[in-house]
Amino acid sequence: SGYIGIRMEKGDHLVGMEVLDEGATILTVTENGYGKRTKTGEYRRQSRGGKGILTIKVTERNGPVVGCSQVRDHDQVMLITEQGMIIRLRASEISVIGRNTQGVKLINLAEGEKVVAVAKVVPAWLDDRED
């Protein structure tokens, strides 16, 4: 048994989940190198079993979503391609725009190359702290 957290359509996949902090933004990145940040206030609360909320308009141009991360202006993120190329960006350099948009180009990719992951950079002092 258990509870249904989210009802997904056939072919949909969960690529990320965040506990929202007020004042942060959600970075969404697609496989064709597009992305954007959206204010957390644009995401309404849903009950269990909800269908979710559209966060980016997926098109042939930008491709499917590969990841998301909650970020603030001072954060940095890395985009990783299937060929092993990595680009590091300041979150503040990525446009903050609405949910129902396609995003902006974050990385130039070679023909046929795809972004496969996005990761928030954790400062060394956080990584080395004792629990």
Image (cartoon, rainbow, N blue to C red):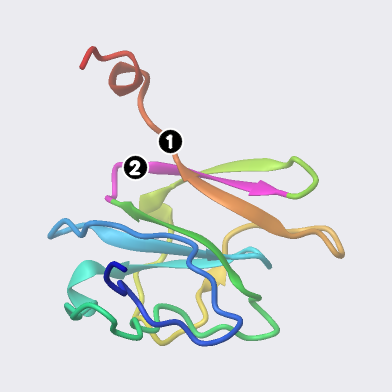
- Callout 1 environment at 10 Å: few (<14), some (14 to 19), or many (20+)? few
Element marked by disc 1: loop
Of circles 2 and 1, the one toward us is: 1
First in sequence: mark 2 or mark 1? 2
Determine whether label 2 and label 1 are within 8 Å by CB. yes
Alpha carbon distance from label 2 to label 1:
7 Å
Question: From which residue to which does the magenta span run?
Answer: 72-81
Looking at the image, which is closer to me, 108 or 129?
129
Horizontal arrangement in the rendering, residue 18 relative to residue 59 (left or right): left
Q: Residue at x 45, y 84 (%)?
A: 101
Q: Residue at x 24, y 77 (%)?
A: 43
Q: Position of residue 21 (x, y in %)?
A: 16, 56
Relative placement, left or right, of 4 versus 65 is left
The residue sitting at the left extreme is 22
57 to 125, vertically: above or below: below
What's under tag 2, amino acid-wise?
Answer: Asp
In-image side of 38 versus 34 (left or right):
left
Looking at this rendering, what residue extends furthest in the right direction? 111
For disc 1, the marked residue is 121
Q: Is residue 23 magenta?
A: no
Q: Number of numbered discs present?
A: 2
Q: Quadrant of residue 10?
A: bottom right
Question: What residue is shown with label 2?
Answer: 75
Instruction: Give the amino acid type for the residue marked by disc 1 in the picture.
Output: Val
Q: Residue at left 64%, top 57%?
A: 107
111 in relation to 9, above or below: above
Report the quarter where the C terminus lies: top left
Chief SS of the magenta region: strand
